Image (spheres, rainbow, N blue to C red):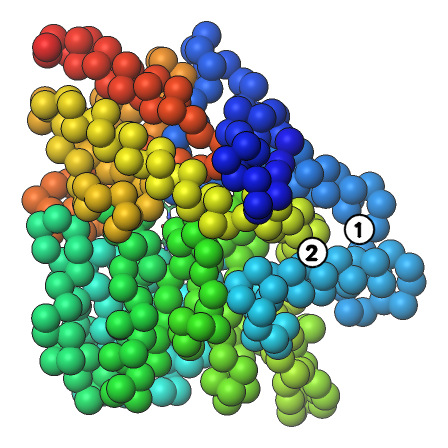
Amino acid sequence: MITSRSTYRQGFDPVSIKADFPILNREINGRRLVYLDNAATTQKPITVIEATRRFYTRYNANVHRGLHTLAEEATAALEAARREVAAFIGGVKTEEVIFTRGATESINLVAYAWGQHNVKAGDRIVLTQMEHHANLVPWIALAKRTGAELAYIPIDDNGYLVLDRLSEIISSKTKIVAVTHMSNVLGTINPIETIIEAAHARRALALIDAAQSMPHMPVDVRSLGADFVAFSAHKMLGPTGIGVLYGKESILADMEPFNYGGEMIGEVTYDHADWASLPWKFEAGTPNIAGAAAFTPALDYLEKLGMDNVRRHEHELTEYAIERLSLLDSIRILGPLNADHRGGAISFVDKDVHPHDLSQILDQHGVAIRAGHHCAQPLHRRLGLVSSARASFYVYNTRGDVDQLVYALKEARGYFGHE
Ligand code: 7TS
């Protein structure tokens, strides 16, 4: 049962939300599944699962090519998803919504299709010390190809960006500033408005990695003024294999394509081709039509809950989890301790038990968390760590889930002979 925006207090009930997610009925090792790996991927409500089934049982066909009923319905589903995304992210034009395989591909698209033609030797690419590899490695590769340099906005020991030297780091040589909105390790919500403004003051572009923010809080890309925004459907109740690159129309219009082939062309001869209009110029080949068809109900679900309510629920849960985890002396939480400044991805280390061991013992208690470097090796090194454990929340998580996490952490310590 989902509720309208206005009835948060009476209506936002994660227990009844749980009932919409069949997988959450599973038992793992004889315990109720407590799924706390939402920063990696979220579970899917029945409406998303049904939409996938409906696509393949009712109107599977290729898009933009056929004139038969199924082709028209499949095309309509793809374009309806695009309209829904455009509305969800703040009312942008559909020309500005490009479907990709996910946030990773969205960022690679910019690093190639924009970067290759706009970044040259001696230019600067600015990132932060807390980036996921998806918003790091494509830029390292671009810097290597072009001879550009990389510069990093540093973090402090509490997991906040240090902005003191921002106008120095974003120098006049800077061509793009690519920053995560919410860290997948620290949970930190970054002051991206300030960073976008600083980038624009130097005539640099700003790319926002919204893989962790778009699913968890209202994000209005138009009012932020970002030039590019990347995110993935699978982290926001939708299917895997589809994501979005938002780009300002004027910038996308000037860019060369990323991939070449069918679907993205205007007119082709044996020795010449020109490109389709936006957004199809960037969507070569058969797109993930089934994915788009199932992305729409995921966005519907979040819209009905209301993104303000989603944020409020996770804020409350994060506050509770930090409070409970802070009572465990052996645990060090990474990132801000104030839930106002962070999302619900909480990474931590136990002074005695390795994150992989924690994760395995927690699994014995039905609790799914992540252990490792979470695709942020340089950040872990900066924190003096190799790996960490991470619990991350979503709409269906409850205080009971946090209690089960804390209980299982204590059990894990006991298993290894610690108090
Ligand atoms: N950016 C951030 C901030 C992320 O957290 C992730 C995925 C990505 C980009 C890449 O998204 P993808 O859908 O293209 O893979 N983060 C994680 C994680 O923290 N654990 O597994 C995937």
Q: Is 115 displayed left or right of 131 in the figure?
A: right
x and y, in percent, of residue 412 in the image: 22, 14
The type of residue carrying mark 2 is Ile
User: Mark 1: few, some, or many residues within 10 Å (few <14, many ≥20)?
Assistant: some
Q: Is 62 displayed left or right of 318 in the figure?
A: right
Residue that appears at 44% across and 29% down: 397
- Residue 355 visible at all: no
The type of residue carrying mark 1 is Asn
Q: Nearer the viewer, residue 9 or 202?
A: 9
Residue that appears at 64% across and 31% down: 1
Residue that appears at 72% across and 37% down: 50
The mark tally for this picture is: 2
x and y, in percent, of residue 7 in the image: 57, 40
x and y, in percent, of residue 295 in the image: 63, 51
Residue that appears at 80% across and 69% down: 65
Q: Kindly identify which residue carries mark 1.
A: 60
Q: Kindly identify which residue carries mark 2.
A: 289
- Asked if 382 appears above or below 351 in the picture, the reply is below
Circles 1, 2 touching at the beta carbon (< 8 Å):
yes
Q: Secondary structure at mark 2?
A: helix
- Residue 324 visible at all: yes
Q: Secondary structure at mark 1?
A: loop
